[in-house]
């Protein structure tokens, strides 16, 4: 699609489009969350995603490109990763429907820092003092955004922090999966677990409600944009150099601020802006140091 540009520019464009897809998905869920129970939203959206994955399977079958299922020994990690994805999704969406869009996105920008810290603790990766300093400053930025102990503190923001922790655990497990485990099966396992958990939770709480055509359309659109996000981020990582396209992840904060202002009238306050600058700035510095050490 963007073949006339260099691979890194193509990767940057795909990364920005991926962040747009993820943010629009969040936007639709936030809108639907005003009128439907959260677990029902997760269940229906998950069914749409499973339908997309089934269509993709038939497409690959027609083209004789079906990925081989992973070996049995890899499934415990795949299922644990799926569980972390489920918990991260639930915590994120529970916070999303209650917290301003920009605040949610700003806290989520700390995910790369959390993954770096977790890689040191659990995977034995080596990080110098400069990146440790960046991680600490980034987490100070998160504290500035959530402002614990003040009148403006909303406990629901802790759900987003919890989502970051679960998402970091998911990414750390993903790092340990061997290359021969096709990402398709990881996605399928995750999608099925999300649907099963959401259906059980909704049934247990007796919160099933009649869904309108408009709500179905929004959830279908959310699932479609989520799939677009996944496909674009895969394209970004395969077309461009990882070190060149990674900084464009932070474009999601710009999308979130724009949508929050245009659709909900949300204007980030000075604390959110300052915290966001610290989180994004330290994330970019940590990326720069990682690239420098690698070279």
Image (cartoon, rainbow, N blue to C red):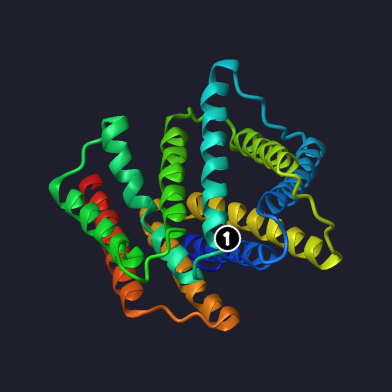
Query: Which residue is more in the foreground, 231 or 62?
Result: 231
286 displayed left or right of 128: right
Q: Secondary structure at mark 1?
A: helix
Which residue is depicted at the point 71% across and 54% down?
41
Residue 16 x %, y %: 51, 66
Residue at horizontal 79 percent and vertical 50 percent from the top: 208
Find residue 33 and report its horizontal and vertical position in percent.
66, 62
* Residue 6 visible in the picture: no
Quarter of the picture containing the N terminus is bottom right
> Residue 253: percent from the left, percent from the top?
45, 69
Which residue is under mark 1?
22
* Residue 87 position in % (x across, y down): 53, 42
**Residue at x-position 31% and y-position 31%:** 122
Quarter residue 142 falls in: bottom left
**Looking at this view, is 183 or 270 the one in front?**
270
Q: Residue most toward the left? A: 129
Residue 253: in sight, yes or no? yes
Query: As drawn, is 91 to the left or to the right of 248?
Result: right
Looking at the rendered structure, the number of numbered marks drawn on it comes to: 1
Query: Would you place residue 246 above or below residue 173 in this image?
Result: below
Instruction: Quadrant for residue 284, please give it.
Output: bottom left
Vertical position of residue 63 compared to residue 73: above or below: below
- Residue 119 vertical position relative to residue 99 in the rendered view, above or below: above
Position of 222 with respect to 136 (left or right) is right
- Who is closer to the viewer here, 56 or 154? 154
Q: How many C-alpha atoms fall within 10 Å of the one at disc 1: few (<14), some, or many (≥20)?
A: many
Residue shown at 80% from the left, 60% from the top: 216
Task: Answer left or right for 223 relative to 143.
Answer: right
């Amino acid at each position: 699609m963007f073949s006339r540009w260099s691979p890194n520019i193509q990767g940057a464009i795909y990364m920005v489009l991926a962040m747009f897809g993820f943010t629009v998905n969040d936007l639709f869920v936030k809108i639907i969350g005003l009128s439907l129970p959260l677990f029902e939203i997760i269940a229906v959206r998950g069914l749409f995603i499973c339908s997309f994955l089934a269509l993709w399977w038939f497409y690959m079958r027609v083209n004789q490109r079906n990925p081989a299922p992973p070996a049995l020994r890899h499934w415990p990690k795949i299922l644990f990763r799926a569980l972390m994805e489920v918990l991260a999704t639930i915590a994120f969406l529970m916070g999303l429907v209650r917290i301003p869009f920009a605040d949610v996105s700003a806290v989520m920008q700390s995910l790369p820092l959390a993954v770096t810290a977790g890689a040191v603790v659990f995977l034995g990766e080596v990080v110098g003092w400069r990146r440790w300093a960046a991680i600490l400053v980034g987490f100070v930025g998160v504290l500035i955004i959530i402002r614990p102990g003040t009148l403006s503190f909303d406990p629901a923001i802790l759900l987003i922090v919890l989502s970051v922790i679960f998402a970091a655990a998911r990414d750390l497990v993903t790092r340990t999966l061997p290359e021969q485990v096709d990402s398709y099966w990881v996605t399928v396992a995750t999608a099925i677990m999300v649907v099963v958990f959401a259906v059980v939770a909704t049934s247990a709480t007796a919160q099933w409600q009649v869904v309108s055509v408009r709500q179905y359309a929004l959830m279908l659109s959310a699932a479609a944009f989520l799939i677009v996000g996944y496909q674009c981020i895969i394209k970004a990582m395969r077309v461009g150099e990882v070190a060149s396209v990674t900084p464009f992840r932070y474009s999601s904060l710009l999308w979130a601020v724009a949508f929050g202002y245009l659709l909900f009238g949300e204007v980030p306050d000075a604390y959110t802006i300052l915290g966001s600058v610290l989180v994004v700035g330290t994330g970019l510095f940590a990326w720069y140091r990682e690239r420098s050490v690698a070279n």
